[in-house]
Amino acid sequence: MTTARMPSPTVKDDVIRVVTWNLEHNGIDRNGDDTRWHTAMHVLADLKPHLLLRQELTRAHMYGARTVWAEAAQLGGMIPFLATATPESANPTGVYVDPRFFDVVEYYEHVTGMWHPVCNPVVRLKGTTTNLSVASFHLCSFDPQQRASEAKRLTTLGKPGMATISGGDGNSFPHTRMETAPMPDWSTITDRSYVAHRTLERDGRLVSDTRPDEILSGQHNGQPPVFRELGHYAATELGQQYNNPLAPTASLWRKDQGPMRRIDRLYATPQVAKALMKLEVINTEDVRHASDHAPVVATFSRAKLHQALSPDLELTA
C-alpha cells in the first residue's frame, strides 16, 4: 500500500479546507486490489485537506490499523482517528487532523445503536481560545427512525457555546426546496429495498426522508437552526454561482436507484459557517473510479475562522 509521499500543506495557507468523503469500502476491492485507494490518495493530494472526515474505513482497524496510518502518511503526516467498527457494520468513520494547524485536545465516540459511531475529535486552531468539535458521521442506511435518532445525537454538538464542523453520508435528502436534483419519483425506482430504506409514510403516501437534515439545519417556530448546512449556506448567504454547491454526490455508480442525489453534506455551527468562503462537490474521472460518492470540500477563511474561535480576543481588540 506504499506510494509516493504527498507534500505537507504549508503553514502559510490563508484558508482551512475541510473535506468529507465516503470512499467505497476504503478503496479496496474484495479481492484485495487497492488500486482505488491509490487513486483516492491522489485525489486527496490535490484537495489538500486540513481536516478530513472519512466514511467507510472498511476493516481499517485490522493489522494494527495500517491502512489508517498509511493514509495519514500520504496526507503529509496528519493525525488519524478511527471510530469503532460494530457487529452491524465493518465500515467505521474516521477523522484526520493536520497538526500544523490544529492541536488535538479531546476525543469522543458517539454510539447511537449498532450502526456507525460518530468519530469526534475536538481540536483547537492554533492561536485561538475556543475548541472546535469535528465529527464524521455515516447515518444508518436502512432505517429512517434510526437516522433521525442519530441526527438528534449530532445536535448535542451544537449546544450553546460550542463550535462544530460535522460531515458525512446522510443516507437521506436535503429538506430545502432549492436543490439542483429533484426528489426521487419512488414509483420508478427498481430497487424496492432502497425505496423502503429511504422513504417515510406521510398521509398514506411515501415521501423522501428529509428528517435528518430538518433536525440538523431546519428552522422551527422562527428559531434559528442548530447548524447551517454548508451547501445551502454557500448557495444562499454567499450567493455562490460557480462550482455548484448543491451538486449531487451519489451514487456515481448505481443506476437502479434513480438519478444522483446530494446525500453527502457538511454542517457547521452558525459562527463557524460565517467563515465559509466556498463549497465544492468534486466529481472527476479519478473520483468516479475511486468511489460511488463524490467528496465535498468546504473552504474557510483562516482569518475569519480564527476570529470565530477567539471571541474573547475579539472583544478585547
Image (cartoon, helix red, strand yellow):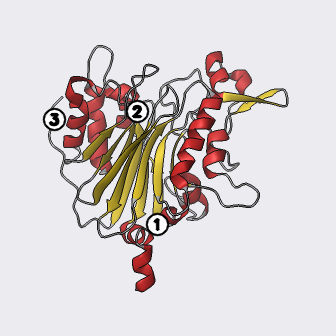
User: Where is 117 relative to 177, above or below?
Assistant: above
Q: Nearer the viewer, mark 3 or mark 2?
A: 3
User: Where is 216 relative to 25, above or below?
Assistant: below
What residue appears at the point 37 percent right and 25 percent down from the top-left corner?
Answer: 25
- Residue 51, image x, y percentages: 34, 51
Tag of residue 3 = 3
In the image, 87: left or right of 227? left
Mark 2 to mark 1 CA distance (whole Å): 30 Å
- Residue 33, image x, y percentages: 26, 19
Tag of residue 288 = 2
In the image, 45: left or right of 249? left
SS class, disc 2 = helix
Q: Tell me if I can see residue 51 in this picture.
A: no
Q: Earlier in the sequence, mark 3 or mark 2?
A: 3
Q: Are marks 1 and 3 in contact (CB under 8 Å)?
A: no
- Residue 193, image x, y percentages: 62, 17
The residue furthest right is: 203
